[in-house]
Image (cartoon, rainbow, N blue to C red):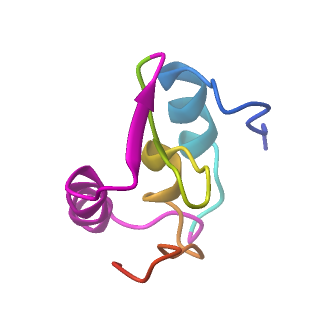
Amino acid sequence: MKTIQSASATDEEIKTYLDESPEGFTVSDEVAKERTSICNGCEEKVSSLGIDRCQVCNCIIKLKTKLTHTKCPIDKW
């Protein structure tokens, strides 16, 4: 499986990473959309170079919200 090398990963790199992930590694699109919606309304979200990130954990929101074994660092999801 490919890895994400930097916080400036492109949408294409993130999509490829998620598409190549083993079964059970990612949540459903519905769960990811719900998580993303919560992040989009959070005061800790910042955008830089077109990439939304969390100021608390420095994650790439589009990636983290899709992964099964992750959680919000301030317990919003």
Q: Indicate the quadrant containing the C terminus: top left, top right, bottom left or bottom right.
A: bottom left
Which of 76 and 15 lies nearest the eye of the viewer?
A: 76
Left of 22 or right of it: where is 1?
right
Q: Indicate the quadrant containing the N terminus: top left, top right, bottom left or bottom right.
A: top right
Pinpoint residue 45: horizontal percent, then vertical percent: 38, 48
Left of 43 or right of it: where is 41?
left
Which of 41 and 30 lies nearest the eye of the viewer?
A: 41
Q: Residue furthest bottom?
A: 75
Pinpoint residue 19: horizontal percent, then vertical percent: 54, 41
Identity of the residue drawn at 45% across and 57% down: 66
Q: How many marks?
A: 0
Dividing the picture into quarters, in which one does residue 62 lie?
A: top left
Identity of the residue drawn at 59% across and 66% down: 25
> Is residue 34 highlighted in magenta?
yes
Which of 17 and 11 lies nearest the eye of the viewer?
A: 11
Identity of the residue drawn at 42% across and 67% down: 27
Pinpoint residue 73: horizontal percent, then vertical percent: 53, 74
Residues in magenta, as a range: 24-49
